[in-house]
Image: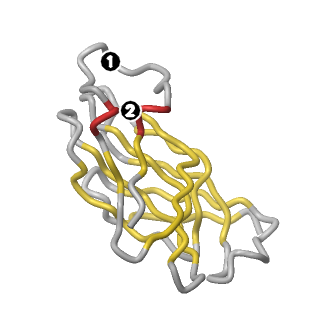
Amino acid sequence: MLIAVLGAFHVIGAPTALPSLTETRIWSDDVYKLEIKTVSTGTGGQIVAGGKAYSSSGVTSGFLALIGADGHVLKILRTAPFVPFEDAIAANGSIWLLGRESPEDGIHESPHNVLQQYNSDGKFAAGISAA
């Protein structure tokens, strides 16, 4: 099991009331490697992190982690085949991700960027592809 500690990241624009992120961990039972590619905060102190996870069987998947203002992980969503590399939280709490589609083998990434929107609870709302 891999544990990724967000404390290594400096979150730009973070409110001063953020919890110590050195205590915030993102994990999944079948993950042996996790790449956190992006972290953002919203005006209410909520945090989102996105990136790519690798299973012990070699399958890859994008993920989106929703973290509360108290530093506890609320939800981890699998976004496969989409892998985010940039994120932002809008004033209304909606989450925007910019990334690319990547097959489960993780080798042949799409050359086209994709923009995805999720509501504040992590439910997928819309996706736009540049292809």
User: Where does residue 58 sit, x and y in percent of width and height?
Assistant: 60, 82
Amino acid type, mark 2: Thr
- Badges 1 and 2: C-beta atoms under 8 Å apart? yes
| Above or below for 85 versus 57 | above
Q: Quadrant of residue 31?
A: bottom left
Q: Residue at x 39, y 44 (%)?
A: 48
| Above or below for 27 versus 47 | below
Amino acid type, mark 1: Pro
Q: Residue at x 49, y 25 (%)?
A: 10
Please indicate whether residue 129 sits to the left or right of residue 50 in the image: right
Please indicate whether residue 66 sits to the left or right of residue 49 in the image: left
User: Where does residue 21 sit, x and y in percent of width and height?
Assistant: 33, 32
First in sequence, mark 1 or 2: give its number.
Answer: 1
Q: CA distance from mark 1 to mark 2?
A: 8 Å
**Few, some or many C-alpha atoms within 10 Å of disc 1 (few <14, some 14-19, many ≥20)?**
some
Disc on res. 41: 2
